[in-house]
Image: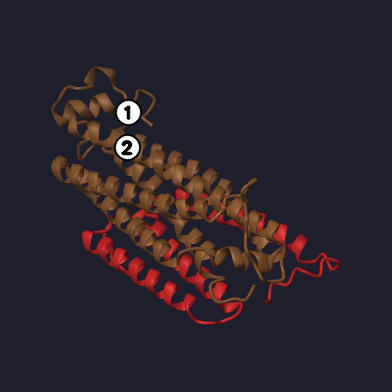
Amino acid sequence: MSDHAHPTVKTFVTVWASLLALTALTVFVATLELGPFNAIVALSIATIKALLVLLFFMELRYSTAMTKVVVVAAVFFLMLLVGLTLSDYLTRGWSSYINPFR
Amino acid sequence: MHLTTGSTRGLTLPDSELAVHNLKHHFADLEQQKATSTFGMWLFLVTEIMFFGGMFAAYLIYRLSYYNAWVAGSQTMEIRLGAINTAVLICSSLTMVMAVHFAKLGNRKLTAICLILTLLLGFSFLGIKAVEYHGHWVHHEVPGPNFHFEHEGNFDPRHVSIFFALYFAMTGMHAFHMIIGAGLLTWLLIANARGRFSPEYHSPVELVGLYWHFVDLIWIYLFPLLYLISHHHNG
């Protein structure tokens, strides 16, 4: 954690190297047979990568509070979109072909 | 965005004078103008998140509905090309962030070099994507009258066609954003060469940077969803 108002070149290079390493990791994990965890692990790694891009490359960490609120609101509404839609589809008991745990 | 200042176009003015020319009359100072434009860009990107979010939601629902067909469609993807393209985009994000860094320092030459590198990496991504699209085309995997999918699994090949429809919609919209990004980078290069940016005024570079990283962000989710998560599953 740095106290600088702006990220340094070192920060950018570290983030870049981390993103490449996480990409290699997610490709490696895809070669393992983990059942439903393939999707969970892959999307978790993607979310870590997304956070790195948002916080450092897009400098959200150094942005105004208002900008942060807008981004958090966007994530909230995206969750609302996906969550409410799935809560409908996944509770349609008569459509037996839907099984998220395969 | 505040780009045309008319009178300063094509001229090289001292920094102080440039700063005055770049300040629009409805802002108190350059700092407020910059905060406002950055906030505006984020608002635009939020609408973009919701735009792509709809396609992500559709993808998720269809994957749960036609799981076997989805796995079969997903396994036609070339993970190697997808992984290379992911790395290419990540590198382009680094060069973009360095372009912003050098623009802040007022180093026109290094800003130009970083912008050119970003542009070249962007075109590399599109080139590799075109190779993939060509592969899908010759294998009759493009939805439409020529769609044909050989299979042995327990699923309807028409559902694989839905997978490819969403695949082309999502990667196509993503590629379209990259093409717009390439246009924006070209425009930045021209403005940079004309000496339009300075340590006091370089908002356009920062805002295009935000846009470019956002496009990277979308790909970060497209890559696992389209290429990886079904790789080891049985259709």
Which residue position is annotated with label 2? B204
Label ID, residue B223: none
Q: Position of residue B182 (x, y in %)?
A: 34, 40
- Asked whether the residues under marks 2 and 1 belong to the same chain, the reply is yes
Which residue position is annotated with label 1? B3
Whether B145 is drawn above or below B24: the answer is below
- Tag 1: amino acid: Leu
Q: Is residue B31 visible?
A: no
Give me the chain that's red.
A
Residue in the image at 34% along x and 67% along y:
A20
Assess whether mark 1 and mark 2 are in contact (beta carbons under 8 angstroms). Answer: yes
Q: Position of residue B169 (x, y in %)?
A: 56, 48
Q: Nearer the viewer, residue B226 or B140?
A: B140
The mark nearer the N terminus, 2 or 1, is 1
- Tag 2: amino acid: Pro
Pointer 1 indicates a residue of which chain?
B
Q: Is residue B221 visible?
A: yes
Residue in the image at 40% along x and 62% along y:
B81
Residue A17 sits in quarter: bottom left
